[in-house]
């Protein structure tokens, strides 16, 4: 099992120091989210943060999770990914997502937030553009949302980062999974409009997660699958409060004493997952959990 920690702590913690701490704790890699803000928390720019991590570390793998397709062109995403992969000497993974935070698009960018079918359609077309650029170093594409003619893009030497997609719903599972090298899934609609819905998260069951994995395998049997998890490891009052809020379903297994959380992650590996992306809900959880993870 691979363990990737998510840099979601905002701009008050230097990303280089944070990444080096995760590397010292034995995490396989780290990822950086692409946001202006979430709730009342500001976020640093994704590409600047990723570059800081690339320059500060030597062996740690890292990636974007996920660059927001509504924020930028797929051509820019592909060019930045190829460049960063070269700078990091092959350690970067390029994660692109459809975009889920309406507040950031309508408020932060001042643009129209597309309805779900359009977001999914834009996402599929963007992934097709990136896939072609990664595979050939160029792209000609005509679709409903993008008309691309890129004769050359660099740096391109035939090597490229792994392309990672997020597949939460039936359409993205069906259309994104065949295009990517790795897919990340999550069960339940617990991210709504720009915030986390803990009540919705509490309804997710083990069966929901196993079914999600099985559905992806039906589309592409051999694709590596990761799972997006919210977790809190420790014995503080904040952790215990979350544990009580989440009840006794899947998500509650990822909140509580570090040994309990590690055991739940080990169980997820037995379901066919090769990676978990861990997002801490309570500061200090990464450090508390690290000694208990199976290596």
Image (spheres, grey):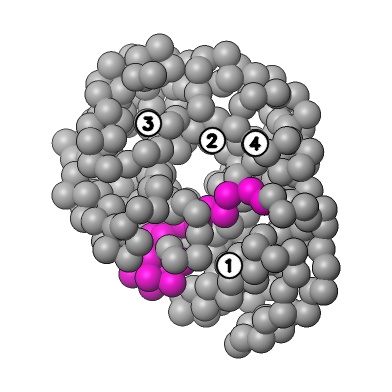
Gap in angstroms between the C-alphas marked 1 and 3: 26 Å
Whether tag 3 and tag 4 are in contact, CB under 8 A, the answer is: no
Which of the marked residues, 1 or 3, is nearer the chain's N terminus? 3
Instruction: Kindly identify which residue carries mark 4.
Output: 91
Which of the marked residues, 3 or 2, is nearer the chain's N terminus? 3
Q: Which mark is residue 6?
A: 2
Q: Position of residue 52 (x, y in %)?
A: 76, 32
Quarter of the figure that contains the C terminus: top left
Q: Nearer the viewer, mark 4 or mark 1?
A: 4
Which of the marked residues, 4 or 1, is nearer the chain's N terminus? 4
Which of the marked residues, 1 or 2, is nearer the chain's N terminus? 2
Q: Which mark is residue 159?
A: none
Q: Please tell me whether mark 2 sits on a helix, a strand or a loop.
A: strand
- Residue 215: in magenta span: no
Q: Position of residue 184 (x, y in %)?
A: 43, 51
Gap in angstroms between the C-alphas marked 3 and 2: 16 Å
- Residue 167: in magenta span: yes
Gap in angstroms between the C-alphas marked 3 and 4: 18 Å
Q: Is residue 251 above or below residue 221?
A: above
Quarter of the figure that contains the N terminus: top left
- The residue under the point 43% across, 72% down is 175
Instruction: Kindly identify which residue carries mark 1.
Output: 127
Whether tag 4 and tag 1 are in contact, CB under 8 A, the answer is: no
């Amino acid at each position: 099992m691979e363990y990737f920690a998510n840099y979601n702590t905002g701009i008050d913690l230097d990303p280089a120091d944070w990444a080096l701490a995760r590397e010292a704790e034995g995490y396989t890699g780290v990822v950086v989210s692409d946001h202006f803000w979430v709730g009342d928390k500001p976020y640093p720019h994704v590409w600047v943060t990723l570059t800081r991590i690339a320059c500060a570390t030597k062996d740690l793998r890292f990636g974007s999770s996920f660059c927001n397709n509504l924020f930028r062109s797929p051509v820019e995403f592909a060019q930045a990914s190829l460049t960063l992969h070269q700078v990091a000497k092959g350690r970067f993974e390029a994660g692109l997502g459809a975009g889920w935070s309406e507040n950031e698009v309508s408020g932060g960018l001042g643009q129209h937030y597309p309805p779900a079918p359009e977001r999914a359609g834009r996402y599929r077309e963007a992934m097709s553009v990136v896939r072609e650029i990664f595979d050939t170093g160029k792209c000609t594409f005509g679709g409903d949302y993008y008309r691309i003619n890129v004769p050359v893009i660099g740096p391109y030497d035939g090597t490229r980062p792994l392309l990672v997609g997020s597949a939460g719903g039936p359409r993205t599972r069906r259309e994104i999974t065949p295009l990517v090298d790795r897919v990340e899934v999550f069960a339940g609609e617990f991210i709504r409009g720009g915030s986390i819905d803990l009540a919705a998260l509490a309804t997710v069951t083990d069966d929901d997660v196993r079914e999600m994995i099985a559905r992806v395998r039906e589309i592409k049997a051999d694709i590596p699958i990761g799972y997006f998890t919210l977790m809190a490891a420790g014995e503080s009052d904040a952790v215990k409060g979350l544990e009580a809020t989440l009840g006794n379903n899947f998500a509650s297994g990822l909140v509580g004493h570090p040994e309990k959380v590690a055991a739940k992650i080990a169980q997820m590996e037995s379901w066919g997952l090769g990676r978990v992306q861990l997002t801490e809900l309570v500061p200090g959880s990464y450090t508390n959990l690290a000694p208990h993870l199976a290596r």
